[in-house]
Amino acid sequence: MSEAEQLPLTGGCQCGAVRFRVERLGRGSICHCRMCQKHFGSFYGALITSHGVVWTRGEPKRFRSSNRAWRGFCGDCGTPLTYEVPDQAIELAIGAFDDPTRAAPTTQVNPNDKLPFVDSLAQLPTELPSDDPPEEAFKRTVVSYQHPDHDTAVWPQEPEEKSAPQVGALGNA
């Protein structure tokens, strides 16, 4: 894909309070370090070196995760967004891009911290929608308040419900 075909590279958080644009991408990686596991609340962090980052709406709140690095996230919805080391290019969360397929990882780093089951995840059984009709019926009733995967002139749009449900009331939404 040519550089012109790659533009624009945009993304942001789940609620839309923080949006970004990127001039070009560098190395994409899967990081297995414990700090990325905690930051992403997942088995690993997927990050890509990003050049010419411009915050087009809001800016991440930052947490100093070590003596060398800061982690950026949306202060409103908590979406993990950045890994930042002074005097180095910023790394953005691949899942925060509007089209994450354009920021595919090409390497894995910090393998000593890799959780022992990660390599076998692809072998887990897959549940199809037809396997759980009540769950599929529930999913058909879900209305997403997530920011769309493109820039918007105005955000947020007002959701119909403003109060959060009690813990456990949502199931797997």
Image (cartoon, rainbow, N blue to C red):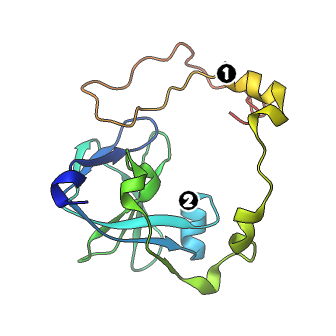
Q: In terms of secondary structure, where does tag 1 sit?
A: helix
Between marks 1 and 2 in the image, the one whose residue lies nearer the viewer: 1
Q: Residue at x 63, y 81 (%)?
A: 113
Q: In terms of secondary structure, where does tag 2 sit?
A: helix
Nearer to me, 119 or 97: 119
Rendering coords of residue 106 (x, y %): 43, 73
Tell me if residue 44 comes above or below residue 131 in the rendering: below
Question: What quarter of the picture does the C terminus occupy?
Answer: top right
Rendering coords of residue 94 (x, y %): 43, 58
Tell me if residue 94 comes above or below residue 170 in the rendering: below
The quarter of the picture where residue 101 lies is bottom left
Nearer to me, 69 or 156: 156
Residue farthest to the top, as pictured: 160
Tell me if residue 9 comes above or below residue 170 in the rendering: below
Q: Is residue 172 left or right of residue 93?
A: right
Rendering coords of residue 164 (x, y %): 63, 26
Which label was assigned to residue 40? 2
Residue flagged by tag 2: what amino acid is it?
Answer: Phe
Q: Earlier in the sequence, mark 1 or mark 2?
A: 2
CA gap, disc 1 and disc 2: 27 Å
According to the image, label 1 marks what residue? Answer: 140
